[in-house]
Image (cartoon, rainbow, N blue to C red):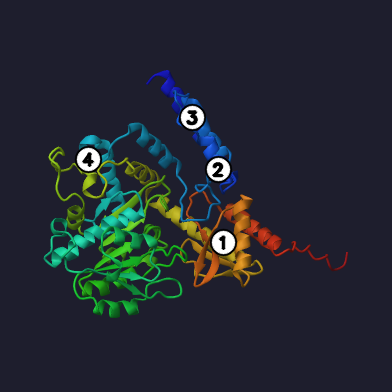
C-alpha cells in the first residue's frame, strides 16, 4: 500500500471514530433535509478527478450538518434498530478491506470457514436442531424469501411436484396460514414467491397481537393439500410472541410446514431468563431473524435457519454452473443457502461478535435491553396522562398521551425535533401510539432516566403547563 492509500484510510477511520465518540450526546434525529443534502453532495458529475480526502470530508459534513440519524446511539428508540458493537465494526472494516466475494469457498476460504463456524454457534445459542442449515441474507425480508422457498419445495415435493423444474403454473395450490398481526415482510415474501393473496388464510390475533391458537385448528381443517403456517416471535409493536410450540404441534398434525418470523424476538432464546417465552421454538421448520438488530452488528445481516437442509439447498442452488467448482467435503459454499451469488462477507462481523461476547455476553445484551424496557414502563406510569398500551414482555413499549391522537402526535413530533431521544409513531387497535424499542447495547439506565425526564418535560410543555413547584416545608423549625 502506498502512502496515499494509508492517508485516505486513516482519514476516514479518524472521522468514523470521531462520529462514534460523539454518539452519546449527538442530536438523535436527522436535521438536514433532502434539498440541503442534494446541494452538499450533489451537482454535476465532476469532469476531473478530485482529492479523495475532500470526498471523505464531504461525508463528514453530511454527518455534522444533520444528515445522519444516530440510530446506533443510546437514546434511539424508534424502529427496531440495534447499535453496533466495536468489535463488529472493526470486523466490518476488515471485511471491506479484504473485499472477499463470499459466495464460494474458493473465493474466500477464511470467510467461508468463519461463516460455517458462526452458523454452528448460532444454532447452539438459539436452541435449534443440530442439523439445521443456515444462510446469511441481507435481512429478515430475504430470510423469509429463502425459508419460504424451502417450504414451497418441501410441501410440493410431498405432493409429487418438482417446483424448481416445473414452476407454479399447474402446481397444486399451497395454502398459506398467517396471523392477523404478521409483519409486512411476510406478505412481501409471499408476493415475491408467487403464492398470491387468494391462498392466504388469516388467523385472528389476541389483544397483544399473538396468533390465537384455538382458531388455528379450525383454519387448518379447511386447508386441504400443501400448507405453510407463518408464526411470529416479537410483534413489531407490542413485542408479543406467538406460542410457537403449540402452533408447531397443531400444524404438524396437518402435515404443514411452520415458518417463524423471529426478526428480533427469536433472540429471547439466547437468554436463560427469557427462553421460556419461546418454548417449543425448536419444533418449527424454519426461522428468520436479523443479526443487525439484537446481536448489534452493522447493517446488513439477516439470518435464515431451516430444519430440512435438503429442501433449503434445493430451493437455492438447484444446479451448479459449469464454471463453479463442485462442492468439496468440509468446504462450505455459502451460495447453497442464500439467493445471492456475489455478496459481501456479512457473516464475518457475526463471527466476531459471537467470538467476543460468548454465550453470556449475548444473553447480557438481551437481558439489559429488556430490563431497560421494564424501567421505561415503571417510570412512564408515574407521569400524568400516560397510558401503557401493551404488556411489555420483551423490548417493546406502546405509549399514549391523553385520550386523543392529537396530544400523542404533538409529543412525538416535539421529541423527534428535540434531539435528546427519538421515537416513532404507530397505530395500535385503532389509536395513535408512540412506540419504544430498546435494542442497542449502548442504552443504559441513565439513558432511560434522561429520556423519561425529557418525555415528561415535553408532555408538560405540549399541555401548556409547567412543572409544579415543590410544596413548602411543613412542621416546626
Q: Is residue 455 above or below residue 218?
A: above
Q: Is residue 319 left or right of residue 77?
A: left
Spatial CA distance of label 1 from label 2 is: 37 Å
Q: Residues within 10 Å of mark 2 (few under 14, many from 20)?
A: few
What residue is disc 3 on?
55
What residue is disc 4 on?
104
What residue is disc 2 on?
35
Q: What element does badge 4 sit on?
A: loop
What residue is disc 1 on?
376
Q: Is residue 459 above or below residue 35?
A: below
Q: Residues within 10 Å of mark 1 (few under 14, many from 20)?
A: many
Q: Earlier in the sequence, mark 2 or mark 3?
A: 2
> Who's the residue at 25% across and 36% down the image?
108
Spatial CA distance of label 4 from label 3 is: 34 Å
Q: Indicate which label's residue lies in the foreground, 1 or 2.
A: 2
Spatial CA distance of label 1 from label 4 is: 46 Å
> Who's the residue at 44% across and 28% down the image?
9
Q: What element does badge 1 sit on?
A: helix
Q: Earlier in the sequence, mark 2 or mark 4?
A: 2
Q: Earlier in the sequence, mark 4 or mark 3?
A: 3
Q: Earlier in the sequence, mark 1 or mark 2?
A: 2
Spatial CA distance of label 2 from label 4 is: 42 Å
Q: Indicate which label's residue lies in the foreground, 4 or 3.
A: 3
Q: Is residue 372 left or right of residue 229?
A: right
Q: Indicate which label's residue lies in the foreground, 3 or 1.
A: 3
> Who's the residue at 37% across and 72% down the image?
211
Q: Are marks 2 and 4 in contact (CB under 8 Å)?
A: no
Q: Indicate which label's residue lies in the foreground, 2 or 4.
A: 2
Amino acid at each position: 500500500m502506498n502512502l496515499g492509500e494509508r492517508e485516505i484510510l486513516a482519514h476516514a477511520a479518524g472521522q468514523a471514530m470521531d462520529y462514534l465518540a460523539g454518539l452519546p450526546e449527538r442530536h438523535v434525529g436527522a436535521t438536514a433535509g433532502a434539498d440541503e443534502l442534494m446541494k452538499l453532495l450533489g451537482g454535476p458529475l465532476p469532469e476531473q478527478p478530485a482529492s479523495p480526502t475532500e470526498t471523505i470530508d464531504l461525508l463528514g459534513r453530511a454527518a455534522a450538518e444533520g444528515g445522519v440519524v444516530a440510530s446506533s446511539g443510546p437514546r434511539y428508540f424508534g424502529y427496531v434498530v440495534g447499535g453496533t458493537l466495536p468489535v463488529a465494526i472493526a470486523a466490518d472494516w476488515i471485511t471491506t478491506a479484504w473485499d472477499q466475494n463470499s459466495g464460494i469457498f474458493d473465493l474466500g476460504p477464511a470467510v467461508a470457514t468463519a461463516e460455517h463456524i458462526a452458523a454452528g454457534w448460532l444454532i447452539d445459542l438459539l436452541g435449534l436442531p443440530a442439523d439445521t442449515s443456515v444462510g446469511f441474507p441481507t435481512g429478515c425480508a430475504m430470510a423469509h424469501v429463502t425459508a419460504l422457498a424451502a417450504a414451497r419445495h418441501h410441501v410440493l415435493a410431498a405432493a409429487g411436484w418438482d417446483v424448481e423444474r416445473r414452476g407454479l403454473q399447474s402446481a397444486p395450490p399451497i395454502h398459506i396460514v398467517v396471523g392477523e398481526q404478521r409483519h409486512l415482510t411476510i406478505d412481501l415474501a409471499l408476493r415475491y414467491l408467487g403464492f398470491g393473496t387468494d391462498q392466504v388464510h388469516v388467523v385472528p390475533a389476541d389483544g397483544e397481537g399473538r396468533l390465537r391458537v384455538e382458531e388455528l385448528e379450525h383454519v387448518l381443517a379447511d386447508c386441504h393439500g400443501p400448507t405453510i403456517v407463518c408464526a411470529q416471535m416479537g410483534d413489531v409493536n407490542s413485542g408479543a410472541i406467538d406460542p410457537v410450540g403449540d402452533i408447531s404441534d397443531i400444524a404438524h398434525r396437518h402435515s404443514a410446514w411452520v415458518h417463524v418470523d423471529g426478526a428480533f424476538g427469536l433472540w429471547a432464546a439466547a437468554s436463560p431468563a427469557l427462553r421460556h417465552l419461546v418454548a417449543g421454538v425448536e419444533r418449527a421448520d424454519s426461522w428468520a431473524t436479523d443479526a443487525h438488530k439484537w446481536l448489534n452488528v452493522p447493517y446488513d445481516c439477516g439470518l435464515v435457519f431451516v430444519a430440512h437442509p435438503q429442501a433449503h439447498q434445493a430451493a437455492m442452488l438447484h444446479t451448479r454452473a459449469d464454471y463453479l467448482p463442485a462442492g468439496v467435503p468440509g468446504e462450505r459454499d455459502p451460495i447453497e443457502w442464500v439467493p445471492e451469488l456475489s455478496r459481501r462477507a456479512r457473516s464475518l462481523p457475526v463471527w466476531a461478535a459471537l467470538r467476543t461476547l460468548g454465550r453470556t455476553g449475548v444473553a447480557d445484551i438481551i437481558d439489559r435491553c429488556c430490563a431497560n424496557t421494564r424501567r421505561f414502563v415503571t417510570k412512564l406510569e408515574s407521569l400524568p396522562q400516560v397510558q401503557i398500551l401493551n404488556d411489555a414482555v420483551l423490548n417493546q413499549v406502546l405509549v399514549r398521551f391523553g385520550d386523543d391522537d392529537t396530544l400523542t402526535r404533538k409529543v412525538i413530533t416535539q421529541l423527534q425535533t428535540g434531539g435528546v431521544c427519538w421515537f416513532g409513531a404507530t397505530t395500535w387497535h385503532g389509536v395513535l401510539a408512540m412506540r419504544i424499542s430498546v435494542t442497542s447495547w449502548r442504552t443504559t439506565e441513565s439513558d432511560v432516566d434522561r429520556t423519561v425526564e425529557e418525555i415528561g418535560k415535553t408532555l408538560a410543555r405540549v399541555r401548556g403547563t409547567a412543572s409544579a413547584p415543590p410544596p413548602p416545608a411543613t412542621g416546626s423549625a
